[in-house]
Image (spheres, rainbow, N blue to C red):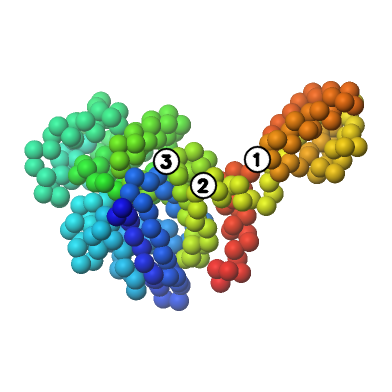
Amino acid sequence: MQPAIEVKHVSKRFGDVHALSGIDLEIHAGEFFALLGPNGAGKTTLISIIAGLTLADSGSVSVMGHNVITQYRQARQSLGVVPQELVFDPFFTVREVLLIQSGYYGIQQNSDWVDEIIERLDLTGKANANMRTLSGGMKRRVLVAQALVHKPPVIILDEPTAGVDVELRQSLWEFIKQLNQSGHTIVLTTHYLEEAETLCNRVAMLKDGKIVALDNTQNLIEKMPSGKSVRLRLLPDIVPVALQALQISHDHGVVELKIDTHAQIEFILSSLRSTKVQILEMQLQQPDLEDVFVNMMRNSGNQSK
C-alpha cells in the first residue's frame, strides 16, 4: 500500500545548526502517528518540509505518492496542517474564513461541508462571529476546521491542544478519532505524552534532528529496562523470605517488588497468604510513554551528537 507520508534521507541546516540529519520515515495510510521530541528536536522543521513551506537541503518527501516539490499542487491538496500558533484573519467571520479557505483549493459550492465541519467542531454558535472576538480555544477549533475544509486524506496536528481547556481537548480528540476511523491519516506532535500513548499506533522520537526511536507504542513501553513492579502496604509490615529476591525498596511502610510478567502477581499473593501477611493496599506500577521518552532522551545523548 502506498504510504501516506514518505521521507527519504532528509537533511536541513540553518547556519551551523543541523535541524534534520538524514531523516528516513514512512507513515502508513490510515495510521494515527505521533512525532515526539523536546523543543529544538526538529519536529516543526520536518512538518514545514512535508507541507512544502521549507525546502530540504537534501532528500525527498512525498504525500500520498506526490513529491512535495515537483508535484506540489497534488501534495498540498492531500494534506491539512493545524499549526501550533494561533494564526487567523481578523476581518472575517468563522464561516467566511472557511469558505475563503475552500477557494484557495479551487473548491466551489462547499457550503454543505463547511456547515458540517462547523457543527462537528461545535462552532455553530460562532459561525457568524468575527474571528478577533473568539477565545483562544475557539480559534483553535477554527484552525482545525481550516485544515479539513478541502477534505485532505492526511492531517498533521502540531500541538493542537496546547493551552486549551479539558472540555475542548476531549471534544477535539473525539472528532479527530472519528476522522481516523473513517480513513484519514493523522500525524500528531504533542508534549502531552498521555495523549500520544492513548491515541497513536506508532511513535517516532526525535532528538537533535535524528530519529532515536521508531516503533509501535506498546512495543516501546514493553522494552523499557525498568519493567513492572508492585507496590504493597502490608500488615504486619514484613516481606516474606520467598519474596525478598524481588524486593526493590521498603520505605515508610510500602514495599516495592519487581515483576517481569503479570503472572508473577499470583506468586506474590500466594506467598503472602501462606505467611498470613495481609494486603492493605496494592498498586501495579508500569512504565508509560513518558518513561520511555525520558529514558530515550537521556540515553541517546551520545548517539545524537
Q: Give amino acid for label 2.
A: Thr
Q: Residues within 10 Å of mark 2 (few under 14, many from 20)?
A: many
Distance between the Cα atoms at labels 2 and 3?
20 Å
In the drawing, what numbered circle is on residue 104? none
In the drawing, what numbered circle is on residue 161? 3
Q: Which residue is mark 1?
A: 286
Question: What residue sits 76% from the left and 42% below the top?
Answer: 258
Which is nearer the eye, 138 or 177?
177
Q: Residues within 10 Å of mark 3 (few under 14, many from 20)?
A: many
Q: Quadrant of residue 30?
A: top left
Q: Which residue is mark 2?
A: 217
**x, y percentage for residue 15?**
41, 76
Foreground label between 2 and 3: 2
Question: In this picture, is 16 found above or below 205?
Answer: below
Question: What residue sits 20% from the left and 52% below the top?
Answer: 77
Q: Contact (CB < 8 A) between labels 1 and 2?
A: no
Question: What residue sits 23% from the left and 60% below the top?
Answer: 66
**x, y percentage for residue 304?**
55, 68
Q: In the shown orientation, is residue 263 left or right of residue 257?
A: left
Which is nearer the eye, 68 or 101?
68
Q: Residues within 10 Å of mark 1 (few under 14, many from 20)?
A: some
Residue 83, visible in the rendered structure: no
SS for dot 3: loop
